[in-house]
Amino acid sequence: MPAEPKSEPRIPTAQIDPVAEGQTAEGITKLCDDHIARARELLGTIKTLKAQPDAALSWDSVMGRVDEISLELGFAGGFPALMAVGHPDAKVREAAKTCEPKVNAFTTDMYLDVDFAAVVKRYGDRGEKLTGTKARLLRETQRDLRRNGLELTEDKQKQLRAINDELAKLVQSFEANISESTGTLKVKPEQLKGLPQSYLDQHKPGADGMVTLTTNYPDYFPVITYAEDRTVARDLTEKFDNRAADKNLQVLDRVLELRNIKSKLLGYGTWADYAIEPRMAKTAAAVRRFLETLAKDVKAPAQKELAEFKAEYVQRLGKKAADKIPNYDRLYLEQKLREKKYGFDAKALSEYFEVSAVTKGLLDITSKLYGVEFHDVTDAPKWHPDVRVLDVDDHGRKLGRIYLDLAPRDGKYKHAAMFEIRRGMRLPDGSYLKPAAALMCNFPKPGDSPALMAHSDVSTFFHEFGHVLHHVLTQQPLASYAGTSTARDFVEAPSQMFEEWSYRRETLDLFAKHYKTGEKIPDKLFKALQKSRSFGRALGTERQISLATLDFEYHSKPWPFSTDEVFNQVMAKTQSFTYLPGTHFQATFGHLMEYDAGYYGYQWALAIARDVLTRFEKEGFMNDKVASAWRKSVLEQGAGEDESKLVEAFLGRPTDLKAYVAYLKGQ
């Protein structure tokens, strides 16, 4: 039997630290280029097998190297994607933005490479018995060769390369434009009546006697929730819903145009047909049915809630009953109704959520559940002094590393999200490459005055940390499916599930203490939180369905069309609230880039998450045996063989929608 072609081992070791390498514009460029070069060498090694007999084609020589390429591209694109929206130096951000197009160009070249495709096909034809993720990787690589244009003529392949290159740059610029856009509004101190004292302490008047507000999350959401002067909420929302509109409306138009051209080029009716194929839903028709079914299920409870909102709108703000409620009054009215109906005071509750205490509580809860420990690494390289670095250990065995970047700053990502820095993989010597991830949020920053979080921020923190756990606890052997590298409409399930720990008495009592007295949340306030929790859920779900429908319609309609017109049509049909004239929410909706016809996945995954929680509800939310089963069945598996089978293994039965429907009904 001929020997396999020899090549130098190219798998990076656990010592490779992207954060240390990528702190300068030169460093981030080198990080990207070096790993793409390694991926190119691996691809070349695979291609040499075309001249070898079939016997030389094995899992290790072909698909094992395909998996190594996935790892290298993760190194090349992961940390640069984070730095493109997170580094304080604009030069580093600009250099980091050049990485994603390079990664995309390499991927395009690889899937259009006839020699590579021929080797994969010959290996597949050998019929080697494969199971689990090995079988999945071969199956999906063969599928992706078709999806990435291998069967196109040479001139159409050239067109596809140009489209992919331009799309990569446009998608990146859309998200960067949002990160770099911060609107400001100056108001008189008396116009902030109703805001928590901690907010007022952090927003002192300037030399001109005016208070400057920004469109950053920690400024914006308290204003629209609590400000008694609703003109401030309106004026700040006008700026909030117009962030980056001067640039992103044109970017969005071009993205939708190119996606439409690309889908047709590849033989699909619409981009939605193309994008949904590899997801759990499989078809655009299935997604449309799912959204339409949800809209029907939520209609009655949403209308019931809306009637109460309208009554409050008329009584409190002196509006006419026939008036449509603007979107900037939704959270304000919801909060007032919660106070009236349930005695729930969100401002009072925030006094029990000082950001440092919440962070410690979140880590303590995770430690108790999963048997892991977190250790601060004070000498680790990081991109900003505010970043906290933690190693995750399991009984002395290092599992991975987490970077917490929690406070807002200029030029930083404006939402909350987990970013991959390094993915896991079983190495040839049997050791495991330690994954690393960063959590980017925009929570109040500790300082002279207390940094108090709204409960919604606490829930968001738990949600995003659910993604972190999915990434760093993985033990999936293949890099292609490690951590959060799952089907897009499953990836939110572990994070949505973990939100529940921010609502339970037994978990809140572990960290929710008054920032002055150290007392736990009083029973009356906790009960008000619980009773009021489901109020507004139907309207909130309606909004999520509305956004998913907008995303779906943008990617289902034949181009060209006006994104403003489609936005107005979808909102009129699916929303109970109105947007300010002259604003362009779609320009601020970053998920249009990364989810592209997949925003429905939040509700799809939530249905799975609510079902998963039924076991915790039965056996205990701090039951480490149940948490261990969840860790082993799902979190460690990454994508596993099939996401639905992973959840079935945890529950001991196939998933169903019973818990989700009950949740929508507020039960």
Image (cartoon, grey):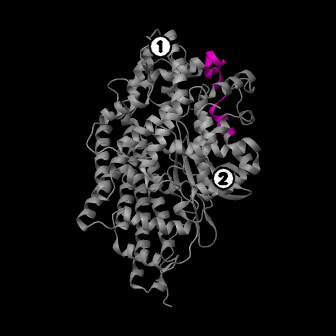
Residue 320 shows which numbered tag?
Answer: none
- What secondary structure is the stretch in magenta mostly built from? helix
> Residue 589 placed where, x, y %?
41, 38
Vertical arrangement, residue 355 with respect to residue 591, above or below: above
Q: Nearer the viewer, residue 166 or 526?
A: 526
Q: Is residue 379 visible?
A: no
Q: Amino acid at mark 1?
A: Asp
Instruction: Estimate the x, y position of residue 335 in percent, counting from the top left.
Output: 57, 21
Residue 441 locus on image (x, y percent): 53, 39
Count residues near mark 1 (Cα–Cα under 10 Å), then give few for <14, some for 14-19, many for 20+.
Answer: some
Magenta span of residues: 338-361
Do labels 2 and 1 touch, CB within 8 Å? no
Judged from the image, the secondary structure of the residue bearing numbered disc 1 is loop
Q: Amino acid at mark 2?
A: Val
* Helix, strand or loop under label 2: strand
Q: Which residue is mark 2?
A: 392
**How much space separates mark 2 and mark 1, taking CA atoms?**
46 Å
Q: Residue furthest left?
A: 155
Residue at image coords 53%, 32%: 298
Residue drawn at (40%, 62%) of the image? 33
- Please check the rendered image and state whether residue 346 is part of the magenta-colored stretch, yes or no: yes
- Tally the marks: 2
Residue labelled with disc 1: 229
Foreground residue among 316 and 454: 316
Q: Would you identify the image quadrant in which residue 274 lies?
A: bottom left
Q: Nearer the viewer, residue 62 or 341?
A: 341
Q: Is residue 407 above or below residue 321?
A: below
x and y percent of residue 338 in the render?
Answer: 61, 20
Left/right placement of residue 385 relative to residue 117 reads: right
